[in-house]
Image (cartoon, rainbow, N blue to C red):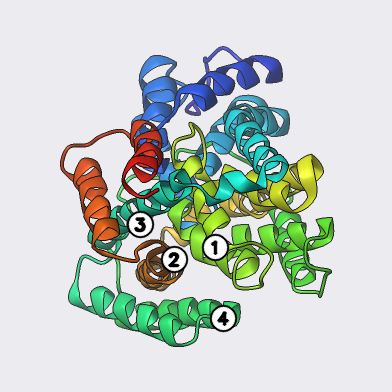
């Protein structure tokens, strides 16, 4: 008997409405999203057992892409197949994506707004948020000396040579070293309980790889094709989801000269205060470059690779969980991801935001609010903007 036998089947529309409610109320980032999903689908609706949900989460955290969105998409698939998967993704993503696209259009219509003190306050808020993310991810993904060393070496290499190819090479080397050192724990003791039978996983894998290769073809900066390529590449190569997408997108949009760092970090700060997936930040970037159409293209493109990998990877999960070297390589990649984010914390986050003692003081207060007092990010973001207006005009 499979995990969701006996559970009342919902239509795609019902799944959409259920996930829309979560998309409107799920504040707090990926970790909080996973908690909301567990409460809704394991405890309340009993669509999955704890063990099945744990297996889904474990796979999605190993795959590139936004882990919490991939978990939601998988749950939608288990309930309503491909229509259910699309309905779950759309419902969870739509609110934040629309808000971020609207924010981009608002800044385009009122360019002077991007030079106010509130933007500087949001940039300092991003420093605190990314610092907290580095700390939390470091504790989880770098629990021993070898992985701490790997993370620091990756950070140093990227600070010296921060091009996209170096980011990819650093993570690849981290994976090889992780496999050689035998990092990571043993396989889970329980058997796989996820009742997903994809008939053509190889087709999804081939589509993922072909589109990744195409994304490296030259495009006119700012064009819809360029936006799609940058977003697809970021979604395909980011491990750890959420905050880790920052250095990939910064390389494409800021380092290339397509967008000022101030505007980029302001949009990222606003994205922190939104419910739903942090990857909806892509809607802001695409909307800033090519209007509403660019925002829609960006959102679809950044989520597409993670979706393809879920459908390709779920049938292979039972193999992956039994092969220690594969798990060790992924543990090495995850340690490298911490180094990737640590490098981004310095450049561009710190260098473009902190310019004096007052800036540093506000960053420390914001970090204290996040790490010690547990102030919600949706409340802290507007307070940071207000603080920027008052203290740093």
Residue linked to disc 3: 127
Looking at the image, is 258 positioned above or below residue 195?
Answer: below
Describe residue 216's horizontal placement relative to residue 176 as left or right.
right
Answer with mark 1 or mark 2, whichever residue precedes in sequence: 1
The dot on residue 261 is 1
Name the quadrant containing residue 255. bottom right
Q: Position of residue 374 (x, y in %)?
A: 22, 36
Name the quadrant containing residue 136. bottom left
Please identify, in this view, whether the residue under mark 1 or under mark 4 is nearer the observer: 1
Please identify, in this view, whether the residue under mark 2 or under mark 3 is nearer the observer: 2
Q: Position of residue 356 (x, y in %)?
A: 29, 65
Q: Position of residue 11 (x, y in %)?
A: 68, 16
Residue linked to disc 4: 163
Question: For the point 43% across and 77% down, which residue is it?
Answer: 175
Is disc 1 in contact with disc 2, using a CB cutoff of under 8 Å? yes
Give the Cα distance between marks 2 and 3: 10 Å
Answer with mark 1 or mark 4, whichever residue precedes in sequence: 4
């Amino acid at each position: 008997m499979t995990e969701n036998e006996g559970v009342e089947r919902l239509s795609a529309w019902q799944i959409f409405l259920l996930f829309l409610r979560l998309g409107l109320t799920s504040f707090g980032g990926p970790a909080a999203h996973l908690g909301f999903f567990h409460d809704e689908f394991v405890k309340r609706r009993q669509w999955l057992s704890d063990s099945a949900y744990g297996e889904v989460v474990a796979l999605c955290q190993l795959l590139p892409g936004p882990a919490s969105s991939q978990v939601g998409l998988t749950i939608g698939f288990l309930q309503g197949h491909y229509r259910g998967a699309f309905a779950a993704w759309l419902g969870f993503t739509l609110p934040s994506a629309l808000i971020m696209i609207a924010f981009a259009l608002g800044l385009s219509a009122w360019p002077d707004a991007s030079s106010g003190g509130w933007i500087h306050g949001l940039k300092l808020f991003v420093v605190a948020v990314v610092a907290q993310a580095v700390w939390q991810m470091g504790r989880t993904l770098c629990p021993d000396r070898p992985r701490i060393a790997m993370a620091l070496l990756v950070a140093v290499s990227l600070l010296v040579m921060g091009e996209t190819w170096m980011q990819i090479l650093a993570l690849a080397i981290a994976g090889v070293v992780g496999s050689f050192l035998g990092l990571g724990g043993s396989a889970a003791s329980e058997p796989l309980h996820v009742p997903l039978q994809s008939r053509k996983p190889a087709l999804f894998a081939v589509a993922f790889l072909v589109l990744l290769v195409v994304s490296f073809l030259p495009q006119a900066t700012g064009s819809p094709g360029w936006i799609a390529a940058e977003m697809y590449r970021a979604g395909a190569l980011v491990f750890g989801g959420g905050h880790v997408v920052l250095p990939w997108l910064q390389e494409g949009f800021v380092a290339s000269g397509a967008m000022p760092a101030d505007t980029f970090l302001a949009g990222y700060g606003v994205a922190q205060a939104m419910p739903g997936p942090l990857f909806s930040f892509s809607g802001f970037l695409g909307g800033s470059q090519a209007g509403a159409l660019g925002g829609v293209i960006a959102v679809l493109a950044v989520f597409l690779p993670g979706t393809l990998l879920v459908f390709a990877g779920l049938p292979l999960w039972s193999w992956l969980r039994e092969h220690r070297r594969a798990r060790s390589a992924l543990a090495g990649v995850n340690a490298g991801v911490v180094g990737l984010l640590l490098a981004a914390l310095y450049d561009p986050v710190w260098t473009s935001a902190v310019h004096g003692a007052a800036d540093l003081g506000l960053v420390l207060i914001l970090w204290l609010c996040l790490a010690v007092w547990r102030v919600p990010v949706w409340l802290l973001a507007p307070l940071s903007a207000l603080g920027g207006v008052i203290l740093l005009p």
